[in-house]
Image: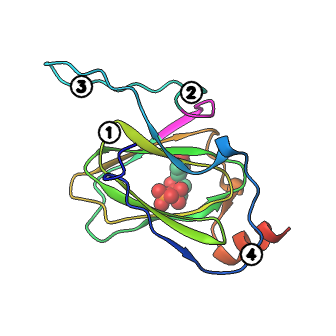
Amino acid sequence: MSGLLLKEASVVSVERPAVKHAARDRARIIDLPKITDQRGNLTFIEGNRHVPFEIRRVYYLYDVPAGAERGGHAHKRLQQFVIAASGSFTVVLNDGRKRRKFFLNRPHYGLYIPRMIWRELENFSSGSICVVLASEEYDESDYYREYDNFIRALGN
Ligand code: TYD
């Protein structure tokens, strides 16, 4: 992955036990296939191949007003893959110990977010579209919407 496109900053914030992940479950940028053509480029994604889960839901954010922030929650089971299909935005991930910032600005790569990661999406450029592939159908009971509850759950 191009290091130039990936802006990453980490700050050790609180001393908490880390959730143990296998390497394949770590949050990371995944580069996608890109078929270049004079008529335009094409990128495709197959579940369990380009992303490490079966895709059960797709949703997208658009018409995000300047300065708005999305996210602000974690998920008990849900895994996601986030793509800047158009424009750019920043995703801030927090596993309870460390914050990492990812800048997404190309449609041919995305950010894999495993379960139990607090996420915030910010700095949406005008006209940007954030496409999210999800491993589960929508289930409100899968959310931690209170940061304290998320941190408490990590300690269990
Ligand atoms: P939320 O997940 O909080 O949005 P974001 O993380 O992008 O800020 O969802 C916002 C609202 O939309 C909330 O009322 C739940 C609803 N929603 C669905 O009904 N289905 C879905 O697939 C998603 C992602 C959200």
Q: Residue furthest front?
A: 3
Q: Which of marks 4 and 1 is nearer the N terminus?
A: 4
Q: How far is mark 3 from mark 1, CA to CA?
A: 10 Å
Mark 4–mark 1 distance (CA, rounded to whole Å): 34 Å
Foreground mark, 4 or 1, reads 4
Q: Which of marks 2 and 4 is nearer the N terminus?
A: 4
Identify the magenta region. 51-58
First in sequence, mark 2 or 3: give its number.
3
| Mark number, residue 107 | 1
Residue drawn 71% across the image and 49% down it: 77
The answer to whether mark 3 and mark 1 are in CB contact below 8 A is no
Which of pointers 1 and 2 lies earlier in the amino acid sequence?
A: 2
149 vs 37, nearest the viewer: 37
Please give the name of the residue rendered at 37% of the width and 60% of the height, measured from the top-left corner: 7
**Amino acid type for the residue under numbered disc 2:** Gly
SS label for mark 3: loop
Q: Does the residue labelled 3 lie within 8 Å of ligand 1?
A: no
Label 2 CB less than 8 angstroms from ligand 1: no
